[in-house]
Image: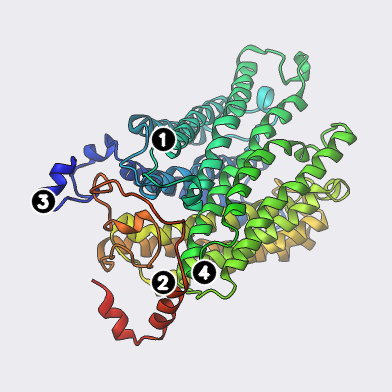
Amino acid sequence: MSDAAIANGAPKNYLNETYGLKSWLLSLDHKRIGIMYLITMTAFFLVGGVFASMIRLELMTPKGDMFEAETYNKLFTMHGVVMIFFFLIPSIPAALGNFLIPLQIGARDVAFPRLNLLSYYLYSFAGILALVAIVSGGIDTGWTFYTPYSSTYATSFVSLALVAVFINGFSSILTGVNFMVTIHKMRAPGLTWFRLPLFIWGLYATSLIQVLGTPVVAITLLLVVFERMFNIGIFDPAYGGDPVLFQHMFWFYSHPAVYIMILPGFAVISDVVACFSRKRVFGYSFVAFSSLAIAVLGFLVWGHHMFVAGQSTYASMVFSFITFFVAVPSAIKIFNWSFTLHKGSVQLDSPMLYVMGFIGLFTIGGLTGLFLSTLGTDIHLHDTYFVVAHFHYVMVGGMVMGFLCGIHFWWPKMTGRMYNEAAAKLGVMFIFAGFNLTFLPQFVLGYMGMPRRYHAYPEEWQALNIMSTAGASVLGLGFMLTIGYLIWSLFKGEKATANPFQAKGLEWDIPSPPIAHNFEAIPVVTWEAYPYGPEDQAEAASAEAAPEHAKEDEVV
């Protein structure tokens, strides 16, 4: 839509500019592509959740009485593959990043709209291939596809799953390139690097990892496919290969991939903390550069996954030290968010509750990671449920909480509708309580020596496993409640104003939902990022003290 067309009449928003499924499936609008990513990822999340539920049901009893060992292997493999490659890695960058980056930098769209649509279809096609592999017989290697089992002994459907992940890697690379070019070249006049929202800094650091790291794992998985097809000796020692080489190549990407998952969560939290404390983020430049530091240092710590794999003790000592060091940029973020909240006018709306949950759960995940970074304790805890609990505290407690925080914060902007705040707060409590009840017992199980990926265990561990399964039920209820009231809001929710949270940022200066090409005229930025001041805190305090009917009168 041209500027002249916008000037001649009331512009339609991106949701209703044109109707029909075809107009969505062929749309080059970054907002529609972000919404399509969100819908598709939610479907994959539900599929992965079903596998997780089946795992927890099996583990309620010490004996493997629901599934055979081979079936259980397929369940935890398919849970990992679906959740990691088709939900956790692309969720915030592909969904929220696609929707928000042009809005936050004052652009009409991303730099390469057609490439953006191609990225979505590559992701969707890869997901379909993975689901075909699942329904055709399943995958039983674990989500890490360790050789020589994956290259020699595993089922034939492993090759199809490897090809699916390989294709999905192209989607990730193209998205990263698109975002980097967009941020470099399409910022509004006056929007210098140190006026950018920290959400943009986080997504930029994520894009660096996607572009530099994803080709390595793509080539690695392709080599496994070639070894399976042609018996080439790359990783299989029977043909002169080296299985430890696979681990080096796989974890060179897959540990930075942890930061592909968590850096976008950090990015969301920074924006929400500033809004709901009515303060500029404390140490803005430190928080911005800490994202880049995490992206760089993340490529130097892959060996801590291999302390018991036979690598040199001296190499393990170096990897252990760097792993401790990489925690520093993450700690900078936690401390700076805490200082931002200090003496702020904190409003405990549902997005802010997700922030509180994120900080608490991610801190536990980070601190327990130190036990796995230490050579002596990792030998005892390696491949136990301690690792499972630590990973989920970082990924679900961190990234998923950050994702839900961002969804709740920008939902009115994306849909033009408000969700039910009481239901949202109830959902936060269910998710937080259910998550801790699920995974805290697993730390104890891991300390006691329960190995992961086993479907049978000694009877003395049953009580803790029952607690974990009960917690998973509460957690699942929280997720379903959240999906339910968000869908309800699309039809019955109150219409949102342009800026329902009184936030600062270019995306909040345009209607909710945005018009088709975002801005009637490209804005000129003359202010710093997060220009909250004492007057904002005073306004927030007076709004909090106002009677309920007065608040209702403010809603248009």
Answer few, some or many: residues within 10 Å of disc 2's Cα (few below 14, many 20 plus, some between 14 and 19). Answer: some
Residue annotated with mark 4 = 353
Of marks 1 and 4, which one's residue comes earlier in the chain? Answer: 1
| Image point (35%, 43%), residue name | 36
Q: Amino acid at mark 4?
A: Leu
Secondary structure of the residue carrying tag 3 is loop
Whole-angstrom CA distance, mark 2 to mark 3, is 38 Å
Which of these two is toward me, 274 or 229?
Answer: 274
| Image point (23%, 48%), residue name | 520
Q: Amino acid at mark 3?
A: Gly
| Image point (53%, 27%), residue name | 166
Classify residue 238 as left or right of residue 27.
Answer: right
Answer few, some or many: residues within 10 Å of disc 3's Cα (few below 14, many 20 plus, some between 14 and 19). Answer: few
Give residue 185's mark: 1
Which of the 4 image quarters holds residue 236?
A: top right
Answer few, some or many: residues within 10 Å of disc 1's Cα (few below 14, many 20 plus, some between 14 and 19). Answer: few
Whole-angstrom CA distance, mark 4 to mark 3, is 40 Å
Q: Amino acid at mark 2?
A: Ala
Residue annotated with mark 3 = 9
Which of these two is toward me, 199 or 78?
Answer: 199
Residue annotated with mark 2 = 423
Of marks 1 and 2, which one's residue comes earlier in the chain? Answer: 1
